[in-house]
Image (cartoon, rainbow, N blue to C red):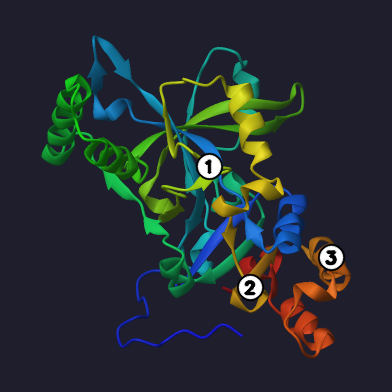
Amino acid sequence: MTEYIEIIGEDYVHSSNSLFHFMTSPKYLTDALKRKALCPRYCNEDIEYLSIVRDGAAFNEVSVLQKCFCDIPLGNIIKRFPVKLIDNNSLSDEEMRCIPHEFSHPDFYGKYALAFSKKWGEINKLQPIHYLSNDADVVKQFSKMMCNVLQEENLPDSVSDALLNWMCYFKPLRGTMKRREEIDSKGKIEIEVYKNFHDEHEWRYVPYGVEVNGHPLDCLIANGAVQSGLLKAISDSFEEEEYRPIWLPFQYDEIKYIIVPNNAGRLEIIKTIHDLPEDKFEVGDIGLQKSILISKILMLDDVKKDF
């Protein structure tokens, strides 16, 4: 069993003591339970607000190899917040009215989740995101420094690597993001919304400096250097066993909560846990360990009513 040393002042008061990773599909949750690990993927991040330019070309987007968590208290997880829809002229006025203007965190990131303690997060090198205000002096200073660095041909690798790694943990206070929404007349479509990112309370796992088969993996890819379809294929390949060095592993006793949307989701995950191979568990009473894991299941339907 995992043991952690308790430290005075370790508990959090204004945020959750747990880190939640939300997922859009029960398959992602069952796959994570079966492999006892979460697999990072490349995710696009908007950095236009940093105003980084090299040889006249602006760097407006990067892809970061990451796994994201939040430390929003459970009672706030299900609270709905307003967002602004960005009209791209592809939808009619009626269709725009059909799209919700308020969402909860699970609406955006999925209604299945695994939660772990923040101590587990610290041990596994998770880092809270640095939220940046566009007009802050520190942003302007960083932008100027990066522009100068990109023009420097003899810069030590240790300096450039450190700056790029630092950028993996940046996010603007507010910005746009794309999501897929169900519209009766068109099925699922991609929409763009403007939202407050700071309210996500994001922590991020970035496997910095990890090699696979003797080759280092880039934790940051700049400006669409890899096409989105290929980037997705690369990310999908990270689920293969050879990429275990970049996975974020966990033990079943390190899980604090398993979140599902409703009773149907709970029954599905209970079956998954019952079917887990015995060699995935510690030596001892396997039935008891499976029962303990099942006891950690929470339904969002109950959270909405009771938290």
Residue on which disc 2 sits: 251
Q: Residue at x 76, y 58 (%)?
A: 30
In the rendered image, the quadrant that contains the C terminus is bottom right
- Foreground of the two, 53 or 16: 53
Q: What kind of residue is marked 1? A: Gly
- How many numbered discs? 3
Query: Furthest residue to the front?
Result: 214
**Camera-nearest label, 3 or 2:** 2
Label 3 crowding class (10 Å Cα cut-off): few <14, some 14-19, many 20+? some
Q: Residue at x 79, y 88 (%)?
A: 288
Q: What kind of residue is marked 3? A: Thr
Q: Residue at x 73, y 78 (%)?
A: 293
Residue on which disc 3 sits: 272
Q: What kind of residue is marked 2? A: Gln
Residue 122 image label: none
Q: Are marks 3 and 2 in contact (CB under 8 Å)?
A: no
The kind of secondary structure element at disc 2 is loop
In this orientation, does residue 14 appear? yes
Q: Give the image location of residue 151, x and y in percent.
A: 18, 19
Above-or-below relation of 229 to 66: above
In the rendered image, the quadrant that contains the N terminus is bottom right
- Going from the N terminus, do you reach mark 3 or mark 2 first? 2
What is the CA distance from the residue labelled 3 to the residue labelled 2?
16 Å
**Camera-nearest label, 1 or 2:** 1
